[in-house]
Amino acid sequence: MESIIALRGITRRFQSGTGEEVTILSGLDLEIEPGSFTVIRGESGSGKTTLLRILGMLDTGFEGEFRFGGMRVQGQPDWMLDELRGRNIGFIFQEGRLFDHLNLRENVAVSLRVQTRLDAAQRRATVNDLARAMFREDELGERGILDQLPRNASGGQRQRASVMRAMVNRPAIILADEPTASLHADLKAGMVALLHDLQRAGHTVIVVSHDAAFYGTGRQLELLGGRLVEREPLAAPPEPDDLPHLPPSDTPVQPRLPEPGPAILWGWLPRAPVPEILRQALREAFTRPIFLLLILSALIVGVGQVAVFSSVILGTDAFINQKMTEGSRLNRVEVKPLSRDLDTPDRFPARAEIAGWTELASVVPRRMSTLSFVNKDGAEVPYPHIGLHPGDPEYRLLSFVAGGPFTGAHDRLEVILTTGLLAETFDISDLAAGKLGFDAFLGR
């Protein structure tokens, strides 16, 4: 018979807080047969939890080979590992880890909700059928234990509900992590018998525990130095006779491997009906006030952030547009009189039209003429100039003028010279290149 789980040369290393490399598992080999009962024991810190996480496909950072049902596990995408785990592995935790806001029936049905397309009536019937093999009649009838919240149930009842949740989908593997850690001594024998019952029903059971209550049941392996060592089982403890039993099976539950499909889309497809997913999400939100408050707070903060960012973006965009408009605003138009208007009283009829523009603040007429400068070679260099009026903004652009500041009173000739004109008139190439200041032509 082919092994359902095959580990070969499994090595797992971690970085310690000081940066040193610590080897937890070293070249570990393990073969698990379908329908078997295996106990992996060891002291605290021996690597039991690490091995359990690898077997549960929760840790893929190991070296070596892991095959499940003949399929290679390492290197598979996350959606494939999720599918393998969801179809084939049921987890039993040491504290049970039931949802406190759901009753035991709803806790058991969680995996039916998210992994099957059964309706509410089918889910209820499935849970009821399984409960008759897990709880006594008086617990189901008079006390209605399935309708109780976990806090109102005993430790043994919570743990049996945890076992029901792990096996309700008929997984091939049952992984139990210290399942008796939170139970009293008189309840441990019942949990051992229950897990052995799962094995007789066809499940492959793997228990990771250092509790001696399991040392007489199934195959015994001990973790020592990162490897597994075979141990002889102790005498099997007597099974309680006051608990119901699951119907036995002659055929082990076989692994269900995912069918080939489009890898990109397969991991996104919901396994449960979409209405059921939405209904469960709403129920989770409205039955957990703190959770709902956090969701609403996150939504409010998110909407506020979107509003703030939108305002900043739109405001910045408007500001940039405004400044670009201001920077590109037409502030000087050169109007030359037409030949036919030279003899008319108003030689600039276009000025009245320009003054009527809606976007125009004002019209300031200025006289433009051409001056001729004589350079050192005696050649005349024509240069256009504009007469400035008192208060014109061009005055604010001047830092100093050779011979004294501009008065703006027009009582004497004042001419604004640009660096380009100065460089051309006085033949100062460095000034034109921007390497010298205005003191380069003072006194010329």
Image (spheres, helix red, strand yellow):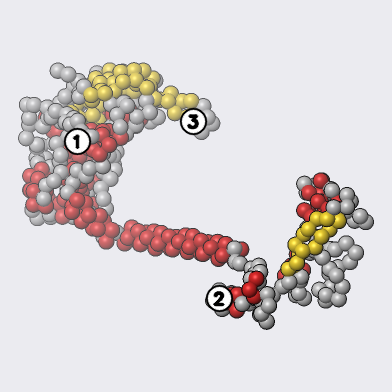
Q: Position of residue 101 (x, y in %)?
A: 25, 55
Amino acid residing under circle 2: Trp
Whole-number angstrom distance, CA of label 1 to CA of label 2: 78 Å
Whole-number angstrom distance, CA of label 2 to CA of label 3: 78 Å
Quick check: 21 left or right of 124?
A: right
In this view, the residue in front, 195 or 287, is 287
Q: Residue at x 15, y 43 (%)?
A: 116
Q: Position of residue 215 (x, y in %)?
A: 24, 26
Q: Earlier in the sequence, mark 1 or mark 2?
A: 1
Mark 2 is surrounded, within 10 Å at the Cα level, by few (under 14), some (14 to 19) or many (20 or more) other residues, namely: few
Q: Position of residue 176 (x, y in %)?
A: 25, 34
Q: Quadrant of the N terminus?
A: top left
Q: Quadrant of the C terminus?
A: bottom right
Residue 195 visible to the viewer:
no
Q: Say if 161 sits above or below 406 in the image.
A: above
- What kind of element bears circle 2? loop
Q: Say if 133 sits above or below 253 in the image.
A: below
- What kind of element bears circle 3? loop
Residue designated by label 1: 87
Q: Residue at x 17, y 34 (%)?
A: 171
Front position among marks 1 and 2 = 2
Mark 3 is surrounded, within 10 Å at the Cα level, by few (under 14), some (14 to 19) or many (20 or more) other residues, namely: few
Q: Say if 67 sits above or below 185 in the image.
A: above
- What kind of element bears circle 1? helix
Front position among marks 2 and 3 = 2
Q: Quadrant of residue 294?
A: bottom left
Q: Earlier in the sequence, mark 2 or mark 3?
A: 3
Residue 339 visible to the viewer:
yes
Q: Position of residue 402 (x, y in %)?
A: 88, 62
Residue designated by label 2: 357
